[in-house]
Amino acid sequence: MEFKFTEENIQKVEAVLKKYPEKKAAVMPVLYLAQDQNGYISGEVMKEVAFLCEMPEADVLGVVTFYTMYHKKPMGKYHIQVCTNVSCMLRGAYDIYGKVKDKLGIDNGGVTPDHQFSLEEVECMGSCGTAPMIAVNEDYFENLDVPSTLKILESLK
Amino acid sequence: MEKIVLPDIPNLHDIDAYLSNGGFKAYKKAVTQSPDDIIDQVKKSGLRGRGGAAFSAGLKWSFMPKGNDKPKYLCVNGDESEPGSFKDRQIFEYNPFQLIEGILITCYAIGAKTAYIYIRGEYHKWVNLMQKAVDTAYARGFAGEKMKETFGGEFFCDIFIHKGAGAYICGEESSLMNSIEGKRPYPRVKPPFPAQNGLWGNPTTINNVETITNVPAIINKGWEWFAAIGEPKHPGTILFGVSGHVNKPGVYELPSGTLLTDIIYKYAGGVPGDKKIKCVIPGGSSMPPLRGDQLEGVKMDAESLRAAGSAIGTGGIMVMDEDTDLVKVLARITKFYYHESCGQCTPCREGTGWMLKLLNRILRGEGSTKDVELLISVANNIEGNTVCALGEAAAWPVKFMVTRFRDEFEARVKSGISIDVRNKVHSMRKTVNPIAPLTLN
Ligand SMILES: Cc1cc2nc3c(=O)[nH]c(=O)nc-3n(C[C@H](O)[C@H](O)[C@H](O)COP(=O)(O)O)c2cc1C
Ligand code: SF4
Ligand code: FES
């Protein structure tokens, strides 16, 4: 499916291009805008981004595949990220991660069949002082334990 | 003790509160002096980088070439992805305007017209908070061309936020620049250094968020004042992030040289259940771990920590009590570096994978004494043989954890190696499948 930015997003792209002396430098923010609109980064998205940022498609692919936050496939409506790095692990993150996996019935990188949830085991999110934590899409939930985590999942409809 | 970076003033994130507490006075004072004077004061203040390497900020600025034949840049490093570090987000949230004022002064000192604040992608909330502060600064004439009206004079600079997308390596300064340029963010070979060849080949200075936030106070109160705080060789306050097995984890701003045990027991409330401490990583997960019985008298500044056998890093203190499984901790740390290696250099790309395999084998109870040696050997072969310091960041925890807690690792492995050899024919000839049946794990 061909990808084109909405009128509103085209204006945001224009604004972002002004932040840098070269168009190529805007590739990351433009990819974010595309992901917001499209849900994930498809080949068609990369084609359009390459055109707008005046760079080869292969270079866009090189950027997309380097970072964890550009999704290469459609994710769940709620993307659940569980940090299991040391500070969280010391305070029970693996119990939480295990329970979340059970509850959602998916493994790391999985998406539920109804596309409500996707799951990712993530590296340190900068919440070590309020560990353990999960993030749901863009929001952090901190100072968790198993019951409070399950409550959060249940509240997501 | 006075706090410099995160003072106890309510609503400081509001520009009016910031202004009524002396906001932007330091910048006004700075522009009455020459850029070289500013660099000199920061040099004399002894301010050292808070992003990991503790390099003199003033000295770094002095490497920037004079003259205006090329555009110059400042990059403010808020990638904050080192496990155990969570301090820069406090600045974005509670004191964004002091960071902005620090950026203005730094840009003036090094002659930069553009600053990029690089913030890790997961920090959506803090990117938004910081963007709001930058927008307010523009609207009120504390950034961009309107600065000429606000402050008089000809100097002004632009501030942009660049949001990362989930890659620890982008905190490494040359990877960070490639990330901003829209390239695949591989670290660059140095030299050339950023002051000669940085963003788009132009002179560039990279400093941590906390480093820059200290600058206005130095200009306001004078370098002598700053130099007298804490340890003379690494003066000022440091934001210590305490996490793991403590009763009150969090960020504590304290003078450099504060005792590690004071931070853990006096400020962070000690260990839950009054358990003993087995291990402390004092500066974020890349730094050499210390044994619980090595902590007495250790002061938290670059020199003292080096003498104690570790490093200050980002000041992220990770505390582990006596019941912690250090093999598991080390395997988790190693998994992180394996995941975050950019793959550019063979020792780092392959070595992190081998260390992880070895540690997982030990965790499964299938390791041998040889594996313990092999871990150290792989770590030694990474260290010093890579393009960027992620190599050391991956090697140090392994090397020092294994040597300092050898008993713990040896208790987990069998002596001697037992490898099941299903195929008893050891000759490579005349066997269909001589290697495959060797089940190493
Ligand atoms: C793998 C790696 C990751 C790094 N991550 C960060 C980071 O997240 N934030 C940071 O300020 N510095 C980080 N650094 C250090 C930077 O390369 C650089 O030294 C620092 O930003 C300079 O600022 P400072 O002198 O003010 O400390 C990292 C270095 C390496 C090798
Ligand atoms: S040391 Fe590792 S992270 Fe750094 S450039 Fe080499 S492969 Fe990449
Ligand atoms: S270890 Fe989980 S947020 Fe840092």
Image (tube, helix red, strand yellow):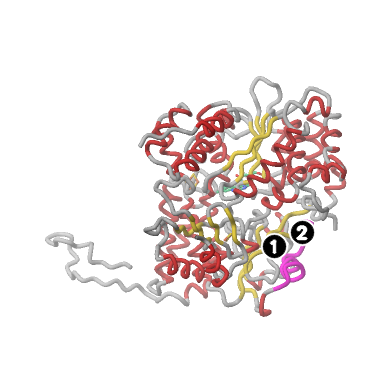
Disc 1 crowd rating (10 Å Cα; few below 14, some 14-19, many 20+) is: many
Labels 2 and 1: the sequence-earlier one = 1
| Dot 2: element | loop
Give the alpha-carbon distance from disc 2 to disc 1, as whole Å: 18 Å
Residue at horizontal 61 percent and vertical 56 percent from the top = A126
- Residue B100 lies left or right of residue B281; in this view the side is right
Name the amino acid type tagged 1. Gly
Q: Is residue B399 visible?
A: no
Residue at horizontal 40 percent and vertical 32 percent from the top = A47
Quadrant observed for ligand 3 in the rendered image: bottom right
The chain under label 2 reads B
The tag on residue B257 is: 2
The tag on residue B250 is: 1
Residue at horizontal 74 percent and vertical 65 percent from the top = B263
Give, as a single range, the part of the protein colored magenta.
Answer: B253-270
The image position of residue B392, as x and y in percent, is: 54, 52
The chain under label 1 reads B
Q: Magenta span has B266?
A: yes
Name the amino acid type tagged 2. Gly
Q: Nearer the viewer, mark 2 or mark 1?
A: 1
The tag on residue B2 is: none
Question: Considering depth in this image, is B251 or B314 the residue closer to the camera?
Answer: B251
- Residue A99 lies left or right of residue B109; in this view the side is left
Q: Quadrant of residue B433?
A: bottom left
Disc 2 crowd rating (10 Å Cα; few below 14, some 14-19, many 20+) is: many
Position of the N terminus of chain A, as image quadrant, is top left
Number of marks drawn = 2
Question: Considering depth in this image, is B217 or B296 the residue closer to the camera?
Answer: B217
Q: Quadrant of residue B259?
A: bottom right
| Dot 1: element | strand
**Residue closest to the far left:** B430
